[in-house]
Image (spheres, rainbow, N blue to C red):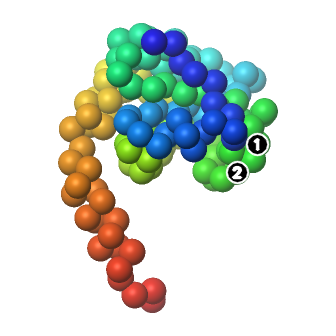
Amino acid sequence: MATKNLTHTDFAETVREGIVFVDFWAAWCGPCRAFAPVFEQAAAQHPDIVFGKVDTEVEQQLAAEFRITSIPTLVVFRDGIMVYSQPGALRAPQLDQLIQGARDLDMEDVRRQLADRDAQPAS
């Protein structure tokens, strides 16, 4: 499956279910251009995962919502929950490990941890 260009209009719907990898990038960014073929290859190898791209120059509001200050930044969602966010271009083996990690997540445990965190009184 090819990567999907994401906009503010379709972003929330896209990340709502399943595993979604989002590459925040810009055309002028050298590391972004270096990471693009790795990201595209992963998309082709894992058709059950959505691989989305957000052009930070076009989608400035979306980039601001996710506090993107360095690109490329890779953000991973699982069932609508952001489970990873880190700037920097990854090599293929690193991205493969991250993909496997996203697949292996125990989402019931993640939801339980989030509920516990939200139940803590503000300090």
Residue 58 sits above or below residue 30 on the image: below
Residue 117 sits above or below residue 33 on the image: below
Q: Quadrant of residue 50?
A: top left
Residue plotted at (31% across, 24% down) = 96
Left/right placement of residue 4 relative to residue 58 reads left
**What percent of the width, then of the height, locates residue 21?**
46, 32
Q: Mark 1 and mark 2 in contact (Cβ < 8 Å)?
A: yes
Q: Quadrant of residue 30?
A: top right
What's under tag 2, amino acid-wise? Ala
Residue plotted at (38% across, 16% down) = 47
In three-dimensional space, the C-alpha distance between marks 2 and 1, rounded to whole angstroms, equals 6 Å
Q: Residues within 10 Å of mark 1 (few under 14, many from 20)?
A: some
Left/right placement of residue 74 relative to residue 69 reads left
**Which one is nearer the viewer's eye here, 23 or 50?**
50
Residue plotted at (61% across, 50% down) = 66
**Which one is nearer the viewer's eye here, 14 or 71?**
14
Q: Quadrant of residue 42?
A: top left
Residue 109 sits above or below residue 120 on the image: above
SS for dot 1: helix
Left/right placement of residue 25 relative to residue 46 reads right
Residue 2 sits above or below residue 121 on the image: above
Q: Quadrant of the N terminus?
A: top left
Q: Which residue is mark 2?
A: 64
Q: Quadrant of the C terminus?
A: bottom left
Left/right placement of residue 7 relative to residue 20 reads right
Q: Which residue is mark 1?
A: 60
